Amino acid sequence: MKLVMAIIKPFKLDEVRQALTELGLQGMTVTEVKGYGRQKGHTEIYRGAEYAVNFLPKIKIEVVLPANMVENALDAIAAAAKTGQIGDGKIFVVPVDQTVRIRTGETNDSAL
């Protein structure tokens, strides 16, 4: 099992969710986060004053899935989230040792 974490632009969330749903994934965790990479923030003008915005709004998606689905999920996320502009995001894949469904006590792949 693997944990796939993707940091994407907020307006791409629906497209990424749809792409993962088409793969047969039944659930995901979505968190509103802030951060920066190569974008390094930007400046905004509010009531005539200029402000530096160092952390940009992003969305973090987390999905745990069987190892044999990881490549398809990575391709789906990358295709759906890509705008071709700086700040499209990143995808991380982390091993998961064990999973337990609290309600039923199912473990590992049957708990997904």
Image: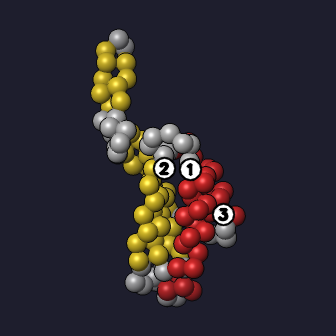
Q: Position of residue 32 (x, y in %)?
A: 43, 49
Numbered disc in front, either 2 or 3: 2
Residue located at (42% from left, 64% from top): 92
Q: Identify the residue at the far front of this view.
A: 84
Amino acid type at circle 3 is Thr
Q: Mark 1 near mark 2, Cβ–Cβ under 8 Å? A: yes
Front of the two marks 3 and 1: 1
Q: Read off the residue under disc 2.
A: 8
* Dot label at residue 81: 1
**Outermost residue, right direction?**
22
Identify the residue under disc 3: 21
Q: Earlier in the sequence, mark 2 or mark 3?
A: 2
- Disc 2 is placed on an element classified as strand
Which label is found at residue 4? Answer: none
Distance from the alpha carbon under mark 3 to that under mark 1: 14 Å
Lateral position of residue 17 relative to residue 31, left or right: right
**Place of residue 111 in the rendered image (x, y in percent of width and height, measured from the top left):** 54, 83
